[in-house]
Amino acid sequence: MSDCIFCQIINKVIPAEFVYEDDDMVAFLDVNPVHPGHALVMPKQHVEKFVDVSPENCKAIAGVIQKIMKSLTGDLGYDGVNLIQNNGAAAGQIVPHLHFHVIPRKSGDGFAHWHGQGYANGEAALWAAKMRAALETTDAA
Ligand code: 5GP
Ligand code: ZN
C-alpha cells in the first residue's frame, strides 16, 4: 500500500529506528513513546486489523512481541509492559496497518489505565452468555 506510512517505513522509504526484522515481521520504535523503547510490532504484509492477519503471521507476531517484551523487562530493566493493539478507528487506531504497541512501564510512572464502568446487576452473566453464543459461530485465525 503505497500511501500507508508503515508500509513506507517497512520498505525503507521513510526512516525509523528498527529493533527487529525478519522475512515477515518488523518492529521499530514509536516516534512518540510512552517511555524509550516503546516499540511497534507488525507484519510486513499490509493488513488493517487483527482479524485480517493470516494464521502463520498471527503466530509469528506473537513470538516477536514476546521476544521484545522479554528484552524490556530483562536486559533493559523495565518493571512491566503493556501490550496494546488499537483495532479500528473507534478504538483509536490512527495508522491503518495492523500493529501492536509494546509499551515498557516503570513502577509508579503514573500512566493511567482506562476507567471501567462496572456492570448492572445480572448484566455480566447476560453478556457472557451472549459472547459464548457468538463465539460458537466465530472462526479464528
Ligand atoms: P495507533 O493509534 O494507530 O495505534 O498508533 C499509531 C502510532 O504510530 C502512534 O503511537 C504514533 O506515535 C506512531 N507513529 C505515527 N507515525 C509514525 C512514524 O512516521 N514513525 C514512527 N516511528 N511512528 C509513528
Ligand atoms: Zn501498510
Image (tube, helix red, strand yellow):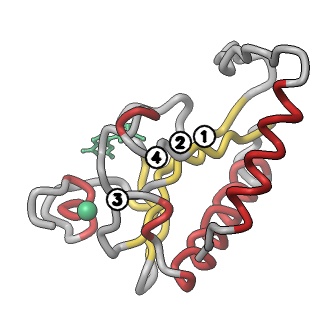
Label 2: element kind: loop
Q: Which residue is mark 4?
A: 87
Q: Position of residue 76 (x, y in %)?
A: 70, 48
Q: Are marks 2 and 3 in contact (CB under 8 Å)?
A: no
The mark that comes first in sequence, 1 or 4, is 4
Q: Nearer the viewer, mark 1 or mark 3?
A: 3
**Marks 2 and 4: which is nearer the front?**
4
Q: Quadrant of ligand 1?
A: top left
- Where is residue 71 drawn, in percent x and y? 70, 57
Label 2–label 4 contact, CB within 8 A: no
Report the residue marked by disc 2: 38
Q: On the picture, is 54 further left or further right than 65?
A: left
Pick whichever of labels 1 and 3 is earlier in the sequence: 3
Depth check, mark 2 against mark 3: the one in front is 3
Q: Residue furthest left?
A: 2
Structural distance between the alpha carbons of marks 1 and 4: 16 Å
Q: Which element is circle 4 on? A: loop
> Which of marks 3 and 4 precedes in the sequence?
3
Q: Are marks 1 and 3 in contact (CB under 8 Å)?
A: no
Which quadrant is the N terminus positioned in? bottom left
Q: Crowdedness of circle 2 by 10 Å Cα count: few (<14), some, many (20+)?
A: many
- Classify residue 133 by image quadrant: bottom right
Q: CA distance from mark 4 to mark 3?
A: 8 Å
Quarter that holds the C terminus = bottom right
Q: Are marks 1 and 4 in contact (CB under 8 Å)?
A: no
Indicate the amino acid at tag 3: Glu
Residue 10, by quadrant, is bottom left
Element at badge 1? Answer: strand
